[in-house]
Structure formats: structure tokens, C-alpha cells
Image: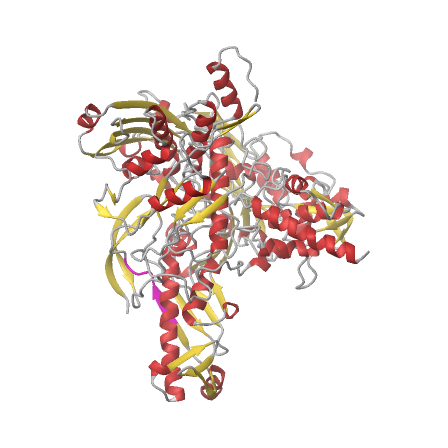
């Protein structure tokens, strides 16, 4: 039964060794899909009908009797002290039911030792209170009637500026997060550069990318005495429940969090934001349910973003391309709140074999919206610098970009000195090169004024998941199956994959299986859906629970038909002895005789004890090839790859938050001015998998792949641009204007045809 | 997000609610709404038709696309009062009971979605396209959904779904003579 074990877990590039609770037997992983009915097959999403018919209920669709509408009061200043708030005119407006500010609200602890509602605001758009009214329109009217007197304070919105002496302080204690840079070192950097034949250094800048899930962040809160039910569009119902319980001093059993359908998060919904607590507070003071859904501007300003970075990267190599030394100094801006940077230093440390490496990350607070994880956090930023500089070195040394990557292949994790659970990046290189027909100087073609070229980039990312993660599998009297999970499906096909796993293990039809998730009530814990972890963490728990249920079922069936358990099988509710259907007897017959069946299998994610689960990718028409262990559902996996590449295309070509440094205001918090890729921008994406099970990863042999397709897309495209034009553009996004300007400079006065 | 500090209490109260008759999915609804209420909010809040989604509320994302007199339009940019007497079709009107429209079937089959939030809007954009022509070119399909953002990036699959749905519509048109 349940026991404590030590387990290594990789989460978004960082490795933790922790005590973990596990239960159930460890199952041998699936080693291939031969003979499997559902696993490995392109199965249509089990909740397709709900999603295409408009019947799927998202948080913003919840309507409760007597429900009020909330809106947050937000600061127009990037940094200011509130001197006075007068809410009387808003309160007098007909239909306004509550106005909360720091003046009438008990202190709730927030991040960085600040209260939820503070007298100091630290970025333009930060919440200073909230309003509840009969309609959303009245709530908006009320916002206009709230008089706030601010004392504007000096502010800083740029990370490098924030770390200069005398810069305005975002928090007392200085703008350098943690008080010192994060430094990693191995080998002897000085010697490594001295022994290099060629040393090159450049500065890279990556912009602030904003998640923009189509469903904005939103909340509905309803109290019943001291119990709170909260609908939230979140990547972690479990985390929201814990944080809300702590903030309101409630036992966990008094907080229920629901999110069955979720309209995208990409990392932005894995961190709990102030809106959660403001909605619960409004519902508490009004005694009525309150719905608070952010509008697009609010969503873009206040719910997280990808950290902007400035990276000084220096690489030393031998003439033959052997890497000798890597030195990275990065400055990242995490905005007004947060405690650590995303691992921009990860690729430099682990992607290539290199004996001498130093990385230093200086993390700055700035008066901007707080950052958070964004698909491939840190690694997308770091890979842009590393993968474009490596490409440049290959060009200079006249080495094929493919060869320089293949020759500096890292077989083990050089940071932990441990082997990877399985790493088949080299096979990805081979496969991708075959698909595109990679050659020396890689397909540079000219057709009138059109130049085409290939660019390649690689990446590394964890994705093996880990404990704690639990599942229950219930077999009903009519042989239908319920898989019960305290996690969520953020749109990635979680429900579908879990149904496949349970049907496979239980030898039952897929249609017999229903997956219940998205509710903390009556479900076992599942982790946050982040770090490409849901399938490799919760999936093995589903399999383990299904196995437990099946064992119970076989024991009961064996005693019912009076046969040795080894001879008995149950498929779709029918009992078989040997290979023959047992005469007349089925699960239904049994149920009729005994009244009801009660079979609940319990299972968990087992420990990681074989080093790390790191996995990987190679090359960009866009062609993307991944080693993600066993592919459980090629249809769903392909959707993740196509979508990740499209987001990567946005990152490299069109997206970027723009802040006016003189006013501290975001200039483009709309989808008109901040350009996410549309149907006109989506490139054809071809994808392939190595698809060899990672038997050391977990009992599925599968690893996560939500994030990897985004990571190398930017450098692959940047490298293709360089090959086609000779331009090395080291700042994201790379716009057509940048390319034109670069070409003009390069060619002097010569006319440039776009 | 409102960051105005304008003193405008009397200017924002307006004339109060007015009666509007809306024809939605072939049913007539009499509603009392403030003149400033959008068609989108009227559908979602007043009529409980939450299949139509609000992604931006300013005509930039397409999640709220419905058909108005057969043409795809952003319901967040229309006021309910402007739609009095016009024929509106939402995603709820696309399927009849449990029977999905070929557009919806194609979205399910080709998995033209991940999270599904933009899907009703995408489907109505495709429906509008196919109402105009059952043999759209690939470029027309691409342009037809170019006002509908899918942040999950499933555009290529949406194109495939639209093309598949077009074939079904075209076959039905030929059969119907």
C-alpha cells in the first residue's frame, strides 16, 4: 500500500530530489504498441462532441442564481503610493453591491512579503481593489466613479536599468532578486577559452511574450457558510485549493475548486493570481456568488508573461568544431513579483558536451506585470542565443550545422553527472535530416528575388514527470469504468489519453470509460499541468489504478465462476475461462446475485530512480522531430507539435509586449497591436517521432511533449534567415523591417527587394 | 480594463432598458436590454447561450463569431438593439439535438482544436464561408478563418476540417439538385 520513497523529479529544467508518497505495484513499462488496442493509436478526443457543439462549460460560462459580476480596480501608474481612495460615488450607484479596497479588507499575505491589497502599486494594471455589481456594465461604471489619489513614485521597467546603482526600488531590499546572481560553473573557463582556436561573443535580446490564452483568466466564487466553491480557469485546481484555504484560514475540506473545461493556459494559469482572492472576497462580503472574468487587456497586463532577457554569450571552440568553453551572463526581468528566474541557463549547461561552462543569471524586479512560466520557460530564451551562436560558429569554421551538433553530443547530464533515462536526440537529428534532405549549405535556393534556406536548431527538455500523482479507477456494475483524477485537462487531450490507458489496461472498449477530472471534490491529488508533466505523471497513476481494479475484478470473477484466477479473464464485462466465454456468466449476472459491485482501484505515479527523464528534438519547412518516448496518441501528440511550432513562430517573428519607458505603460495590450499568429501566419508543420519507449521514465514509457516544439523554433528560423540573407539578427522578434534594414546596411545604397 | 477617472455619473446611466426582439436559431426571443449591451452578452447572459465565447470583447479574436443573416460577424461588435429582426445563428443552432452539423463533425474528426474555446467561432466562420460557396479554394478557407485566432495553433487542422466539411456540403448541394 502507500509508502514513502525518495524520487528525483525534473520540473521545467530544475531537478528536485524529494520524498514522495506512492502506492500500488510498479508495473513494467509498455515496450511497444504491438498488440495494444488503444495506446499508440490516433484516437479522436473523447470530449470532441462537447467541445465542437458549444456544450463544454468553461469557467466564463458558469451562471449561478443571484450571481453578481466583479471587476478589479487597477492602478494606471507603474509605481505609486495610494494616498486616498474615495469609493462613495461608486457605492451610491444603483446596482453596486460591494467595493473592496485595502481600507476595508483584512490583510491577506501575497508574494514578496506584500499584502494582497497594498498601499503601494508596483506596475500599471495592478489590482488595488474590486467591485461587485448586478451586471458587468454597472461594475465597469463603478470603476469610473472611484477616486484614487496616487503619489507617483520613480519606476523602472527595464531589467538592465533596474540593476544599475540608484535605480528606483521595486521592493525594499533591492532589485536583484535573491540578493545575488545565480551562478553555475564546471571545469576551468579560462583554460577552456585559452585552448580554443576560435572564440566568439555576442549579445542576444529576447522579448516579453504574452500567453494570451483564448479564454481569459476568470473566476466564479460561491460561499456556503464557511465553505467555498470556486470555478477557476486554472492549470492546477489542487494549487488553487491549497492557496485559497491558506489565505482564508480554511481547512482544505472546505474549499472546492472546479475546472472541467479550460480554454488554454500555456503556463499563465499555473500561478495563482490576485483575481482568485478578490473574487472570493467579493462573494464573501456580498453573500452572493460572484463572477469575475478578466478582459483581454487585463489578461495581457496582469496574468504573467515570458521573461525578457539580455544574454551575453561567449563560446570557444577548436577548429574542428569541438566546444571548449561556454560563458553565459544573462539578465532577466521578472516583473514586480516572483522569486526566481526561469532557467535561461539550462541549454548552455546541458544541451552540448562541453567541459568548461559558466553561467550567471542576474534576475531583476521591474515595475511591470509579473512573469511566469511560458511553454518551455527559460529554455526557449536560452536556446535562441545558444543555437544561433553555435550556427554562426559552424558557418565561420565551415562546418555543417548538423555536424557541429552531432559532434558535440552530450550522452549524460553534465550538471548532475547522471545518465539520462533515455536520450535519442541523435536519432531525431538523423530522422529530421532525412526528411528535409539536409546537405552542406542546406538547400539555399534563389528564385527571382525570393531566397529560401533551411535553418536547424536543437533543444533539450525534461518531461518524464514524477510523483506525487494519484488516480482511482472504479468499475461499475454494468462494466462501465470511471477514471477519477484530481487534475485538469487544459486542452491537451488529457482525458483522451487517460481513457486510452484505462481501456487498454482493463481490456475494455474505450466507449465504456469515462474520465472524471477538474474537481477537487472526491478526487485524489494530481499535480499542476505544467512542465509537460500531466501524461507522464498522472498517466502512470491511471495505469497503476486500472491494474489494481483489474486484479480485484479477476479475483471476484474467479471465485464466482469457481476457476483458478490464472485462467480467468474479464473483457467488456464478460467473464472468460481459459479463452472461452464462461457459460451464462457475466459481470451483470454477478451483480444481480450480489446486489452491487464495489471495485475501486487505486494507483499512483511511481518514483524516479533511474536518473533523469530528459528528452529532446532536432531541426526546422517547419519539420520537427521528437524523442518523447512511446507516443500514446499520435493525433493528439501531433496537435501539440503543430501548435507549439505556431507559438514559436509568433515568438520569433511577430510577438512582443511594448512598454513606453517614459510612462511605464504597456502600449499594446490588445490582440490588434500584439500580434499572435493567425491563420495567415501558420506555416506547414511536418512532424515525426522517434517513438521508442523510455523504459526508465515510467510505466507508460512515455514522456511529455507540450513544451518542446516551441523551444527550438525561434533559433531554427533565425538560422534559416541567416543562411538566406547573411544577416544575424540577435534580437527577438525578428521583423521584416529588421531584415530590410539589415539588408540595406549590408548592401550599402543598393536597392533591396523585399 | 477601465483606467479612466472621468467624473461621468450622469453620463453613464443612459436611458435604461429597451425591448428587442431577437431571432436566434429560428426562435424568437423578446428581451429587455440596455442599449449598450452587445449581442454577445445578450446571447450569453440574457439567453444563456454560452456556446458563443468572449475572448477579447473588442473585435480582435473571433471567438464570438455568429451568423447574422447568414454572414459571419463578431457578436461583440454588434449591439443587441442593432439586431432586432435579424436572423442570428449561434453554435447551438448548428447542431440539431445530438446530430452535429458536417462542420462540427469535421472539426471533431480532424481535431481542429485543442482547448476548444475558439472552436464555436471557428465553426461559425467556416459555416458562413460554406453558406457563400460550397467549393472554397484553400486560400478562401484560410482567409475565411483569418479573423479567428486559435492560440493553440491548430490552423492547419482547421483548414483540413473546413475542406472536409465543404465536400459534404457540396455533395449535399449536388444531391439536392
Left or right of A447 on screen, residue B168: right
Front in this rendered view, residue A23 or A436: A436
Residue A269 appears in the picture as rendered: yes
Left or right of A391 on screen, residue A633: right
Residue A114 percent location from the top left of the image: 36, 38
Front in this rendered view, residue A534 or A425: A425
**Residue A603 part of the magenta segment:** yes
Front in this rendered view, residue A639 or A15: A639
Left or right of B102 on screen, residue A549: left
**What residue lies at 80% left-to-right and 57% top-to-bottom?**
B176
**What residue lies at 37% left-to-right and 29% top-to-bottom?**
A391
Figure check: A193 above or below A579 = above
Residue A443 percent location from the top left of the image: 46, 32
Q: What's the magenta region? A: A601-607
Residue A247 percent location from the top left of the image: 39, 49
**Residue B66 part of the magenta segment:** no
User: Which residue is at the far top?
Assistant: A749
Amino acid at each position: 500500500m502507500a509508502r514513502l520513497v525518495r524520487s528525483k523529479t525534473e520540473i521545467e529544467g530544475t531537478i528536485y530530489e524529494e520524498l514522495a508518497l506512492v502506492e500500488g505495484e510498479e508495473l513494467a513499462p509498455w515496450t511497444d504498441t504491438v498488440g495494444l488496442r488503444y495506446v499508440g493509436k490516433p484516437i479522436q478526443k473523447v470530449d470532441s462532441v462537447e467541445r465542437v457543439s458549444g456544450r463544454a462549460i468553461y469557467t466564463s460560462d458558469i451562471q449561478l442564481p443571484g450571481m453578481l459580476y466583479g471587476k478589479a480596480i487597477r492602478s494606471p501608474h507603474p509605481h505609486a503610493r495610494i494616498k486616498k481612495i474615495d469609493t462613495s460615488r461608486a457605492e451610491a450607484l444603483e446596482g453596486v453591491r460591494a467595493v473592496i479596497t485595502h481600507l476595508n479588507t483584512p490583510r491577506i499575505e501575497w508574494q514578496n512579503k506584500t499584502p494582497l491589497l497594498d498601499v503601494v502599486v508596483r506596475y500599471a494594471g495592478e489590482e488595488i481593489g474590486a467591485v461587485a455589481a448586478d451586471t458587468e456594465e454597472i461594475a465597469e461604471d463603478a470603476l469610473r466613479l472611484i477616486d484614487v489619489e496616487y503619489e507617483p513614485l520613480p519606476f523602472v521597467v527595464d531589467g538592465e536599468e533596474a540593476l544599475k546603482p540608484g535605480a528606483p526600488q521595486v521592493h525594499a531590499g533591492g532589485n536583484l532578486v535573491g540578493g545575488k546572481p545565480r551562478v553555475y560553473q564546471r571545469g576551468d573557463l579560462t583554460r577552456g577559452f585559452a585552448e580554443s582556436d576560435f572564440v566568439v561573443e555576442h549579445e542576444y535580446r529576447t522579448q516579453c511574450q504574452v500567453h494570451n490564452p483564448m479564454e481569459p483568466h476568470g473566476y466564479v466564487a460561491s460561499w456556503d457558510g464557511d465553505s467555498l466553491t470556486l470555478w477557476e480557469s486554472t492549470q492546477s485546481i489542487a494549487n488553487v485549493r491549497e492557496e485559497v484555504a491558506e489565505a482564508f484560514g480554511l481547512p482544505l475540506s472546505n474549499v472546492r475548486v472546479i475546472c472541467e473545461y479550460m480554454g488554454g493556459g500555456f503556463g499563465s494559469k499555473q500561478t495563482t493570481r490576485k483575481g482568485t482572492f478578490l473574487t472570493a472576497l467579493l462573494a464573501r462580503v456580498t453573500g452572493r456568488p460572484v463572477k469575475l472574468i478578466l478582459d483581454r487587456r487585463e489578461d495581457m497586463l496582469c496574468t504573467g508573461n515570458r521573461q525578457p532577457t539580455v544574454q551575453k554569450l561567449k563560446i570557444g571552440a577548436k577548429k574542428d568544431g569541438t566546444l571548449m568553453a561556454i560563458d553565459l551572463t544573462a539578465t532577466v526581468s521578472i516583473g514586480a513579483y516572483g522569486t526566481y528566474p526561469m532557467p535561461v541557463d539550462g541549454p548552455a549547461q546541458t544541451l552540448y558536451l562541453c567541459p568548461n561552462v559558466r553561467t550567471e543569471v542576474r534576475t531583476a524586479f521591474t515595475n511591470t506585470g509579473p512573469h511566469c512560466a511560458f511553454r518551455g520557460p527559460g529554455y526557449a530564451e536560452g536556446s535562441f542565443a545558444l543555437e544561433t551562436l553555435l550556427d554562426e560558429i559552424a558557418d565561420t569554421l565551415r562546418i555543417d550545422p548538423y555536424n557541429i551538433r552531432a559532434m558535440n553530443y552530450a550522452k549524460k547530464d553534465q550538471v548532475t553527472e547522471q545518465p539520462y533515462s533515455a536520450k535519442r536526440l541523435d536519432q531525431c537529428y538523423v530522422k529530421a535530416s532525412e526528411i528535409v534532405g539536409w546537405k552542406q549549405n542546406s538547400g539555399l535556393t534563389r528564385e527571382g528575388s525570393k531566397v529560401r534556406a533551411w535553418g536547424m536548431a536543437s533543444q533539450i527538455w525534461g518531461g518524464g514527470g514524477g510523483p506525487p500523482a494519484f488516480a482511482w479507477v472504479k468499475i461499475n456494475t454494468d462494466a462501465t469504468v470511471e477514471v477519477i483524477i484530481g487534475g485538469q485537462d487544459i486542452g491537451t487531450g488529457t482525458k483522451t489519453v487517460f481513457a486510452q490507458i484505462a481501456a487498454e489496461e482493463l481490456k475494455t472498449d474505450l466507449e465504456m470509460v469515462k474520465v472524471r477530472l477538474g474537481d477537487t471534490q472526491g478526487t485524489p491529488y494530481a499535480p499542476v499541468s505544467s512542465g509537460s508533466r500531466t501524461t507522464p505523471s498522472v498517466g502512470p497513476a491511471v495505469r497503476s489504478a486500472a491494474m489494481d481494479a483489474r486484479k480485484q475484478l479477476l479475483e471476484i470473477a474467479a471465485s464466482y465462476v469457481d476457476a483458478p484466477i490464472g485462467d480467468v479473464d474479464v473483457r467488456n464485462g464478460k467473464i472468460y475461462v481459459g479463452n472461452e466465454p464462461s457459460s451464462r456468466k457475466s459481470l451483470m449476472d454477478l451483480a444481480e446475485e450480489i446486489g452491487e459491485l464495489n471495485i475501486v482501484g487505486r494507483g499512483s505515479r511511481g518514483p524516479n530512480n533511474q536518473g533523469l527523464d530528459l528528452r529532446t528534438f532536432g531541426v526546422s519547412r517547419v519539420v520537427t522531430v521528437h524523442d518523447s518516448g512511446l507516443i500514446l496518441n499520435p493525433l493528439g501528440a501531433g496537435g501539440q507539435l503543430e501548435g507549439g511550432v505556431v507559438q514559436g513562430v509568433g515568438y520569433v517573428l511577430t510577438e512582443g509586449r511594448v512598454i513606453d519607458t517614459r510612462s511605464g505603460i504597456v502600449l499594446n495590450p490588445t490582440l490588434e497591436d500584439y500580434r499572435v499568429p493567425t491563420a495567415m501566419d501558420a506555416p506547414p508543420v511536418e512532424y515525426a517521432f522517434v517513438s521508442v519507449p523510455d523504459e526508465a521514465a515510467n510505466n507508460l514509457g512515455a514522456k511529455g511533449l507540450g513544451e518542446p516544439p516551441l523551444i527550438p523554433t525561434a533559433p531554427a528560423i533565425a538560422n534559416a534567415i541567416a543562411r538566406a540573407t547573411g544577416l544575424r539578427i540577435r534580437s527577438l522578434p525578428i521583423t521584416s523591417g529588421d531584415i530590410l534594414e539589415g539588408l540595406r546596411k549590408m548592401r550599402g545604397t543598393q536597392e533591396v527587394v523585399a | 480594463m477601465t483606467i479612466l477617472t472621468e467624473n461621468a455619473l450622469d453620463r453613464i446611466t443612459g436611458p435604461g432598458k429597451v425591448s428587442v426582439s431577437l431571432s436566434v436559431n429560428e426562435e424568437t426571443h423578446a428581451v429587455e436590454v440596455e442599449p449598450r449591451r452587445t449581442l454577445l452578452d445578450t446571447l450569453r447572459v440574457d439567453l444563456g447561450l454560452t456556446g458563443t465565447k468572449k475572448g477579447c470583447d473588442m473585435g480582435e479574436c473571433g471567438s464570438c463569431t455568429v451568423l447574422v443573416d447568414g454572414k459571419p460577424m463578431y457578436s461583440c461588435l454588434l449591439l443587441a438593439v442593432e439586431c432586432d429582426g435579424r436572423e442570428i445563428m449561434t453554435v447551438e443552432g448548428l447542431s440539431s439535438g445530438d446530430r452535429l452539423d458536417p462542420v462540427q463533425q469535421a472539426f471533431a474528426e480532424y481535431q481542429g482544436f485543442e482547448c476548444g474555446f475558439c472552436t464555436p467561432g471557428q465553426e461559425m466562420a467556416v459555416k458562413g464561408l460554406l453558406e457563400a460557396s460550397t467549393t472554397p479554394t484553400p486560400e478562401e478557407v484560410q482567409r475565411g478563418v483569418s479573423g479567428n485566432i486559435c492560440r493553440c495553433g491548430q490552423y492547419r487542422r482547421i483548414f483540413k476540417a473546413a475542406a472536409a466539411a465543404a465536400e459534404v456540403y457540396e455533395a449535399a448541394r449536388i444531391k439536392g439538385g
